[in-house]
Image (spheres, rainbow, N blue to C red):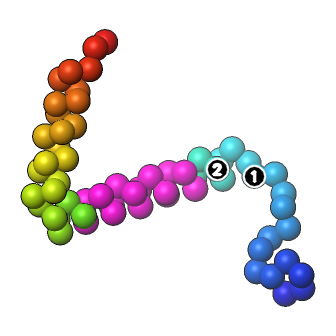
């Protein structure tokens, strides 16, 4: 283990690794959002309506 504990020594991360971690994070985020929407349908509906209103009033 040493001084660093379970952490890896710092080394530059490749673009592919960063993209893979980001994709996994975004998948987890979407999954969490779906779960929250299933558990709190009223709040999810209100959020959808707010989002739709924001998109309608957005100027291109």
Residue 31: image quadrant is: bottom left
The answer to if 7 sits in the magenta stretch is no
Residue shown at 16% from the left, 64% from the top: 40
**Label ID, residue 13:** 1
The residue lying toward the viewer, choosing from 23 and 47, is: 47
Q: Is residue 58 left or right of residue 3?
A: left
The residue lying toward the viewer, choosing from 27 and 57, is: 57
Residue 48: image quadrant is: top left
State the quadrant of the C terminus.
top left
Residue 51: image quadrant is: top left
Q: Earlier in the sequence, mark 1 or mark 2?
A: 1
x and y percentages locating residue 56 in the rendered image: 18, 23
| Whether residue 7 is situated above or below residue 43 in the rendered picture | below
Q: Which residue is the site of mark 2?
A: 18
| Residue located farthest toward the top when viewing the structure as drawn | 60
The residue lying toward the viewer, choosing from 29 and 51, is: 51
Question: For mark 1, does the 10 Å Cα neighbourhood hold few (<14), some (14 to 19), or many (20 or more) residues?
Answer: few
x and y percentages locating residue 43 in the rendered image: 16, 56
Q: CA distance from mark 1 to mark 2?
A: 7 Å
- What span is colored magenta in the figure? 21-35
Question: For mark 2, does the 10 Å Cα neighbourhood hold few (<14), some (14 to 19), or many (20 or more) residues?
Answer: few
Disc 1 vs disc 2: Cβ atoms closer than 8 Å? yes
């Amino acid at each position: 283990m040493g001084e660093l504990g379970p952490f890896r020594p710092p080394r530059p991360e490749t673009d592919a690794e960063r993209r893979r971690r980001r994709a996994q994070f975004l998948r987890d985020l979407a999954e969490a959002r779906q779960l929250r929407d299933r558990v709190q349908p009223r709040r999810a509906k209100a959020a959808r309506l707010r989002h739709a209103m924001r998109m309608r009033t957005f100027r291109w």
